[in-house]
Amino acid sequence: MAIVAPFRGVRFNPDKIKNLEDVVTPPYDVISEAAGTAFLEKNLYNMIQLDLRSSTSQGGDDETGRYAEARTRFDAWQDDRVLIRDDQPAIYLYYIDYTHPSGRRLTRKGLISLVGLAEFSEGIVKPHEKTFATVVAERLELMKACRAQFSQVFSLYHDRENIVISTLEQARESEPVCSVTDHLGNVHTVWRVTDPQALAGVAGYFADKPVYIADGHHRYTTALSCRKQALAEQPDLPADSPFNFTMMYLCAAEDQGLSVLPTHRLVTFPGRLSADEVVRKMAAGFRVKELKSGSREVLIVEVLSRMNEAAMTSSAPVFGLYHAGEDRCFLLKLEEDGIERSESLARLPQVLRQLDVVVFSELLIREYLGLDHQRCVREKLISYFSDPDDALDVSVKKSIADDSVTPLLFLLNPTRVQQVTEVADSGEIMPHKSTYFYPKIMTGLLINKLVAAEKIQVAG
C-alpha cells in the first residue's frame, strides 16, 4: 500500500528570517489578489514569490517568464542561505493549535513526509474530487521549472490507536525547527524526527494502508504528471527516484483535532421568486419551518444551531435557507422518503445519496429550482462561502442592487470525515466544494527539493 519515506526538508533559515509569520502563507489557491499584495508588503522573501498563484489572477503575465523568475529566486534564496536544507532525512511532526469557529480550542496532529506516487486506479492514494487539466498544466510548469514541491498534499489515513503520532512524539527532537502564528491566530509547530527505528515503524504502519486526499487533488495530480514526464525522459527511472514521490501532510481520520467546516452556497436565481414560492418548491421533499424572531444575523445563528442539533441526532440532510429580499429564514429537513421520491437521487450510488452537498445540487437546485449544473457554472449562479456572515452580507447587497434576480442563501452542515473516506473507498467523486478542512496547512514551513541524482530512503 502507501510508501512513506523521510526527506531533507528545505526551510527558512531562522538566522536570516526572524519573523516566519512574514514569509509563510496559506495555500496558493486561497490567496486573493489583495492578500497576495499584502504578503509581499510584509517581506520580499514571502512564499508567494515561489508558490505562484494562478496566471489568471496575475493579469495574464507571460507564464514562461513567471516560472523562470520563480526558479531564479528559489536558487538565489538557497545560495544566500535564506533557505536551508536539512542534512539528514526526517519525517516532520506538525501540530496546529487553533480555535474552532464554535470557540473550542483544539490541536490537530499530523506529519509531513514523502509518499510514493500511485495512480488513482491502484487504490493506494484515493481521491474524492475531480481535477481540472488547466490547473494541473500550470502547476506542472512551475514544478518543472523550480524542481521543487512548495506545498503539501493534505491527506488522511486510519489510525484508531494513534500509533503513528505516538511513535513520532516519543522520538521527536526536544526543540521544534519552527513555530509560527498565522493570520487567524493558529499556532503551527514542526519538529524533526530522524530516529531510524521510529522512521521504520511509521513506514511499516503505512505498508498495508491507503491514504485519502483531503485537500490538494491538483497538487497530487501535478506530481503524477511530473513523474510521467520523468519516465518519458528516463524509462528506467529507479523506484527510489524523487520523481516517484510527493510531499504530503498526513492526519489520522480519527484525530480529535481534525475539523471539517461547511461551505455555504449563495444561489443567484435568475428571476424573481417570493419566499412563499421558494417554500412551496422546497416542500416537495422537505419539512419547512420558518424562524421568525430577531435580526437577520440572529436568524442565521439560530438556523445554524438548529441544523447542528439535527445533525447530532440524524444523518438525514438538513439545510438553512435565507431569502434576503424578504428577510425570511427557514429550516429545511428532508422527508424520510425524500431521496426515494427523487429520480436523480434514486439513481445515484448509496454512498452519495445521503451527502448534503449532493442533495443540495441534485434535489434543491436541479429538481426544485430547475437550474442544471452547466447553467450554474456558465452563468456563475452559485457562490461559495466558508463564513456565513460574509455570505449573508453579499446576499443582502445583491437583493438591493439587482431586482431582476433572487439571492437565496443555503446554509449547509459540514461533510463528515467518515463520508469522505467512504466516498473515496467506493471510487465515487463528490461535488465541487464538498469539504473544507480547517485550518489550512501553511506553505513555506517545508519545501521538498527534487534532485534527480538523489535517492529516497525507503524502508525495507
Image (cartoon, grey):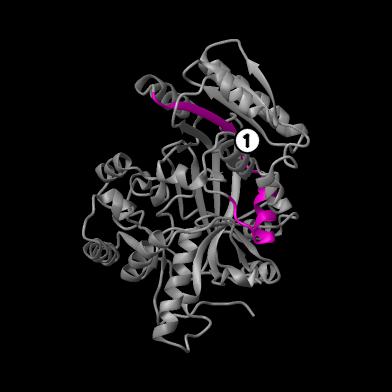
The answer to whether residue 58 is left or right of residue 28 is left
Residue 283 forms part of the magenta stretch: no
The answer to whether residue 435 is left or right of residue 377 is right
Quarter placement of the N terminus: bottom right
Q: Residue furthest top?
A: 293
Which of 24/422 is in front? 422
**Picture coordinates of residue 304 (x, y %)?**
61, 26
Q: Give the residue at x 60% y 34%.
A: 368
Q: Identify whether 401 is placed above or below 78.
A: above
Range of the magenta residues? Answer: 404-430
Which of 336/191 is in front? 336
**Picture coordinates of residue 190 (x, y %)?**
51, 53
Quarter placement of the C terminus: bottom right
Q: Which residue is mark 1?
A: 413
**Picture coordinates of residue 440 (x, y %)?**
49, 46
Element on which disc 1 rests: loop
Quick check: can you spot residue 285? yes
Which of 348/189 is in front? 348
Quick check: can you spot residue 255? no
Q: Give the residue at x 33% y 64%.
A: 142
Count of labels shown?
1
The answer to whether residue 369 is left or right of residue 234 is right
Hey, what amino acid is under mark 1?
A: Asn
Q: Give the residue at x 40% y 80%.
A: 452
Mark 1, other Cα within 10 Å: few <14 / some 14–19 / many ≥20? many
Q: Identify whether 422 is placed above or below 449.
A: above
Q: Identify whether 53 is placed above or below 226.
A: above
**Picture coordinates of residue 338 (x, y %)?**
73, 36
